[in-house]
Image (tube, rainbow, N blue to C red):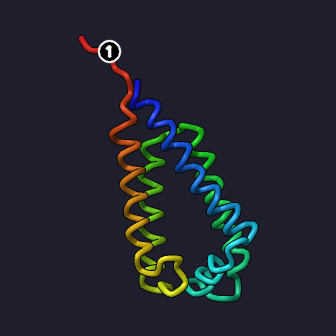
């Protein structure tokens, strides 16, 4: 029972991270360096609409997390997206990251939390015989 509560709290926290990054940092552009990172990786021409698209996608990720639909696929998708995004940023735009190349450490910790939450804490209660 304790694991279920911890799992729920972590799930809501992860969803909040996706919403904050998507809505506040990208869609509302409260953190302009996110658009600068997109411009650095994908080019200036469409950085604004692409940043908004990424932001809306992150909001959709939060909704998917909260829906509880295909949670294992969701966790793997999050892990792949975070690893890919942070690898690109590490090599192409480290000077634009909040903690520079140390951002990779925080991304790795988030990946570990997502993995732990889904593949360890989210054990379905199965009756024992």
In the orientation shown, which residue stands out farthest toward the left?
A: 129
Horizontal and vertical percent for residue 112? 36, 55
Q: Going by the image, does 73 lie left or right of 69?
A: left
Horizontal and vertical percent for residue 51? 67, 73
Horizontal and vertical percent for residue 91? 42, 84
Looking at the rendered image, the quarter that the C terminus falls into is top left
**Vertical placement of residue 66 versus 92, above or below:** above
The quadrant where residue 24 appears = bottom right
Residue name at image x 57 percent, y 56 percent = 17
**Vertical placement of residue 109 versus 15, above or below:** below
Which residue occupies the foreground of this view, 89 or 81?
89
In the orientation shown, which residue stands out farthest toward the right?
A: 28
Q: Which residue has dot 1 on it?
A: 127
**Vertical placement of residue 106 versus 37, above or below:** above
Residue name at image x 73 percent, y 66 percent = 27
Looking at the rendered image, the quarter that the N terminus falls into is top left
């Amino acid at each position: 029972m304790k694991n279920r509560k911890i799992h729920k709290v972590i799930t809501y926290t992860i969803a909040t991270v996706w919403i904050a990054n998507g809505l506040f940092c990208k869609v509302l552009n409260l953190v302009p360096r996110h658009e600068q990172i997109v411009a650095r990786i994908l080019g200036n021409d469409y950085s604004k609409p692409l940043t908004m698209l990424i932001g809306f996608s992150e909001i959709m990720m939060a909704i998917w997390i909260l829906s509880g639909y295909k949670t294992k696929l969701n966790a793997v998708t999050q892990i792949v997206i975070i690893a890919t995004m942070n690898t690109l940023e590490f090599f192409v735009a480290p000077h634009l990251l909040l903690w520079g190349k140390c951002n990779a450490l925080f991304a790795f910790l988030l990946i570990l939390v997502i993995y732990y939450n889904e593949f360890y804490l989210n054990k379905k209660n199965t009756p024992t015989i």
